[in-house]
Amino acid sequence: MKLGVIFPQTEIGTDPIAIRDYAQGIEGAGFDHLIVYDHVLGAVPARFAGAQIGFQQPPYTDRSPFHEVFVLFGYLAAATQRLELATGVLVLPQRQTALVAKQAAAVDILSGGRLRLGVGVDWNFVEYEALNESYRTRGQRVDEQITVMRKLWTEPVLSFDGKWHHVEGAGINPLPVQRPIPIWIGGAAERVLKRTAELADGWFPPGDTNRPDALRTMFERVHALMREAGRDPARLGIEGRMRLTIGAAREWADRADEWRAVGATHLSVDTMNAGLSSPQQQLDAVLRWKEAVTGR
């Protein structure tokens, strides 16, 4: 099981040296990957009053700082040597598909093939509105987006005529190192599980406070859908997440064992909202976590 860290987007600050040192510290400690969350815009809480977004209150607002993922990854590609860079997840339907494919290919090239692109549809309708994309059709469009991106990453010139995309005699250049770049999907709705089973290289199960056993039925559903689609469930990556605040070393180790038992291929720790006031404290915390879950 590969171990990673969730980039403390809302707490890392804006000092580029501190961000560089944090990523290099993660890599130097032997972590396999760094996961970065994505939001382009934040909105004031009043915009969500009365809306059904899946939360009692929005988890992020206009006061939540977020570094843009592809710009950040371009910077970290030069600052690190082997650390996998993963989005967890990029809100794909609020973006132009060909532009995402181009940006992802550039990161993959500059990092030497270290990008993993996690995608999802998200809950923030205000963000879709401001980016001039349809929130209502986001789930319908994302399947075709994944298909188009994979074609753009593997075919120098393509012709594609779908419901949402038309590409005629065009392609991105240069192509990425990974052909195609691995796509992971995040979410828990039935349509998301079906999309994961049919299209994804890996899956981000919901939440970072859930015990893996509570998700076992969902895992079984994904595997059943994969078999229906003619795909081998053993080939699906699964990324578990764990909040630092669930307890101390014993609880961390036990939870990691639970993720291993349900077949997780990856596990990441989230240090946000743990009362850590500096990037160095964030780094020290993940080092303690790694020691607890690996015994070294």
Image (spheres, rainbow, N blue to C red):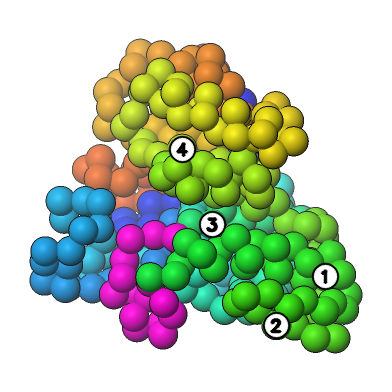
Q: Which mark is residue 119?
A: 3
What's drawn in magenta, residue-wise? 121-135
Q: Nearer the viewer, mark 1 or mark 3?
A: 3
Q: Is residue 130 magenta?
A: yes
Q: Are marks 4 and 1 in contact (CB under 8 Å)?
A: no
Q: Read off the residue under disc 2.
A: 166
Is 105 in front, or is 273? 105
Q: CA distance from mark 4 to mark 2?
A: 32 Å
Query: Of the residues shown, which amino acid type is indicated by label 2?
Result: His
Residue at screen point 36% across, 22% down = 214
Query: Of the residues shown, which amino acid type is indicated by label 4?
Result: Pro
Compared with 214, 11 (above or below) is: below
Q: CA distance from mark 4 to mark 1?
A: 30 Å
Label 4: few (<14), some (14–19) or many (≥20) C-alpha neighbours in 10 Å: many
Q: CA distance from mark 3 to mark 4?
A: 12 Å
Query: Of the residues shown, which amino acid type is indicated by label 3?
Result: Val
Query: Of the residues shown, which amino acid type is indicated by label 1?
Result: Leu
Q: Residue furthest right?
A: 156
Q: Read off the residue under disc 1.
A: 175
Q: Nearer the viewer, mark 4 or mark 1?
A: 4
Residue at screen point 39% across, 59% down = 122
Q: Earlier in the sequence, mark 3 or mark 4?
A: 3
Q: Which mark is residue 205?
A: 4
